[in-house]
């Protein structure tokens, strides 16, 4: 999740003067040649585009292509070495394996479900880019909003979210050495609640879970590193997660995010069961050719209206519950993808009529200083950490009200936590700050589990803990910007989210918008 002050800078190139007749295909060919040159190999992991029924990928070492009609089929090598040589979803698992080869180069990396994930990013009729640039895991780009801990790329480390299932309706016990996908999360929660989601791309994990829970809870710890969550739980540093594991199971390969592995794309995929090419939220920020506008969805000022961007025919988990179980109640805490929920944080924001969305709600947030569930050191040293602490304190307060002794608790609840993303961005995975954030989130989880125990509801509640993406460490010595090279070559482009290139676009009258 973003900080309260972040912006999304746009990089553009107007092309050579006096050449308005160039076709977008000329820009594409030139951009691919520039981006796959050896000069940019340290920061460009690979590029991808679709042309004449084929998905193409290329980098400085080689190129391959895949039929659009067969996303799981074998790729055809065009030259050199296949940039997607491995798709092993278990690459870098467990923690010891990740630490032995951190943020690996392309030849030692893995790109799970690459064909389907890339093709979904290209599937929207007006919002998909013409060319995707995937950062190398080590690329550090603070001038464009990058951090020491990074995500957004296609590889396993940045794509792997934790996936833990616990409580009523969960049949499996102990760790399972396999991986699911983020698009499986909504259908799995639906199965636990005894309903089905319509026309989804994900698969409910019915070999692990089934109906039987009176209450179903989904927890999203934004940006939490799956390996570290499991490691710290087993080490006794996350007692709340350990309580979940004692009555459930964890997939050690986690849940693989949709591409790009960014916040709102995957919050939406988790709660709709479909990829970005179906639900329409292509990135945290993207360009829509149909309107000629930049669209920012992941920002404190736009979270409350994010669901306006959902494409027709997309159903949320909350809508599925209302359809299949009339009278069942749902709650959505601190989560922008809330359409159909009976109670939602951003529903309150909309009802209040605040034009600045959650950005106008700062006076309503609890103080970070003195929060019993927060690490005082990082609250004092990092403004983003303090802000996320306040947001998550409000989240816990809402959860405690929803499950209070005098309340009828919801049949289905989704609760989003932000501090975990802040900590992983600020210090990188496995850092003191990242682990402090995980412990803070766990402290709030323990408060919730204690409340369930007080109400004698633990035995009849199913809990799923996940995230929207993973986290890898950037290298401060690995810097650079492909925008300068594209401009020098005369490519006409608009780069949104730092990696989604729209080519041949008239950018003269398009104004960069503030966002987060």
Image: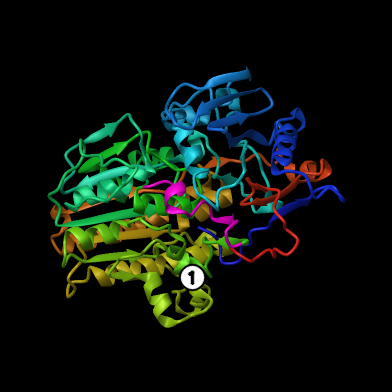
The quarter of the picture where residue 84 lies is top right
Q: Dot 1 lies on which element?
A: loop
Q: Residue at x 48, y 80 (%)?
A: 354
The verdict on residue 289 being magenta is yes
User: On the rendered image, what quadrant is the C terminus found in?
Assistant: bottom right
Can you give x and y, in whole percent of width and height, for residue 358 in the image? 48, 72
Can you give x and y, in whole percent of width and height, for residue 452 in the image? 20, 60
Can you give x and y, in whole percent of width and height, for residue 55 in the image? 54, 32
Residue 113 sits above or below residue 127 on the image: above
- Work out whether residue 215 or residue 510 is closer to the camera in this orientation and state it: 510
Q: Label 1 belongs to which residue?
A: 369
Residue 238 sits above or below residue 333 on the image: above
The verdict on residue 287 being magenta is yes
Residue 447 sits above or below residue 41 on the image: below
Can you give x and y, in whole percent of width and height, for residue 458 in the image? 17, 55
Q: Can residue 487 be seen in the rendering of this structure? A: yes
Q: Residue at x 39, y 43 (%)?
A: 229
Q: Can residue 239 be seen in the rendering of this structure? A: no
Q: Residue furthest right?
A: 18
- Work out whether residue 37 or residue 311 is closer to the camera in this orientation and state it: 311
For the magenta stretch, what is the residue range?
274-291
- Work out whether residue 70 or residue 228 is closer to the camera in this orientation and state it: 70
Looking at the image, residue 351 sits to the left or right of residue 14; the answer is left
The quarter of the picture where residue 364 lies is bottom left
């Amino acid at each position: 999740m973003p900080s309260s002050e972040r912006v999304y800078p746009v990089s553009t190139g107007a092309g050579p003067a006096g050449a308005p007749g160039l076709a977008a295909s000329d820009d594409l060919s030139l951009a691919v040649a520039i981006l796959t040159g050896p000069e940019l190999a340290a920061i460009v992991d690979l590029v991808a585009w679709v042309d004449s029924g084929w998905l193409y990928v290329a980098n400085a070492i080689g190129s391959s292509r895949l039929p659009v009609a067969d996303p799981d089929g074998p790729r055809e090598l065009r030259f050199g070495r296949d940039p997607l040589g491995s798709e092993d979803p278990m690459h870098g698992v467990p923690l010891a394996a990740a630490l032995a080869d951190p943020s690996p180069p392309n030849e030692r990396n893995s790109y799970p479900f690459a064909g389907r994930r890339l093709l979904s990013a290209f599937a929207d009729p007006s919002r998909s880019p013409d060319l995707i640039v995937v950062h190398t895991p080590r690329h550090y780009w603070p001038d464009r909003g990058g951090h020491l801990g990074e995500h957004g790329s296609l590889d396993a480390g940045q794509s792997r979210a934790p996936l833990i299932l616990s409580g009523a309706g969960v049949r499996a016990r102990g760790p399972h050495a396999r991986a699911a996908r983020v698009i499986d999360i909504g259908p799995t929660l639906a199965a636990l609640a005894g309903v089905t989601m319509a026309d989804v791309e994900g698969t409910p994990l019915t070999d692990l879970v089934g109906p039987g829970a009176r209450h179903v809870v989904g927890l999203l710890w934004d940006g939490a590193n799956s390996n570290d969550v499991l490691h710290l739980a087993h080490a006794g540093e996350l007692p709340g997660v350990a309580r979940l594991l004692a009555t459930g199971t964890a997939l050690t390969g986690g849940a693989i995010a949709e591409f790009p592995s960014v916040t709102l794309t995957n919050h939406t995929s988790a709660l709709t069961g479909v990829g970005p090419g179906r639900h329409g939220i292509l990135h945290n920020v993207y360009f829509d050719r149909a309107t000629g506008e930049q669209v920012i969805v992941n920002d404190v000022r736009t979270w409350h209206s994010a669901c306006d961007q959902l494409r027709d025919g997309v159903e949320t988990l909350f809508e599925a519950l209302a359809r299949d179980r009339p009278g069942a109640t749902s709650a959505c805490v601190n989560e922008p993808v809330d359409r159909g929920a009976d109670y939602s944080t951003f529903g309150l924001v909309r009802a209040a009529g605040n034009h600045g969305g959650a950005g106008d709600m700062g006076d309503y947030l609890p103080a970070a200083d003195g929060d019993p569930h927060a690490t005082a050191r990082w609250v004092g040293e990092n403004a983003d950490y303090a802000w996320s602490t306040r947001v998550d304190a409000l989240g816990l307060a809402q959860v405690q009200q929803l499950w209070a002794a005098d309340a009828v608790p919801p049949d289905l609840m989704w609760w989003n936590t932000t501090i975990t993303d802040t900590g992983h961005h600020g210090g990188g995975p496995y850092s003191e700050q990242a682990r402090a954030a995980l412990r803070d989130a766990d402290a709030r989880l323990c408060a919730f589990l204690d409340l369930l125990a007080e109400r004698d509801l633990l035995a009849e509640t199913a809990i799923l803990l996940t995230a929207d993406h993973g986290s890898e460490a950037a290298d401060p010595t690995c810097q650079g910007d492909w925008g300068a090279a594209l401009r020098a070559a005369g490519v006409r482009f608009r780069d949104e989210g730092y990696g989604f290139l729209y080519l041949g676009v008239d950018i003269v009258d398009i104004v960069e918008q503030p966002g987060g």
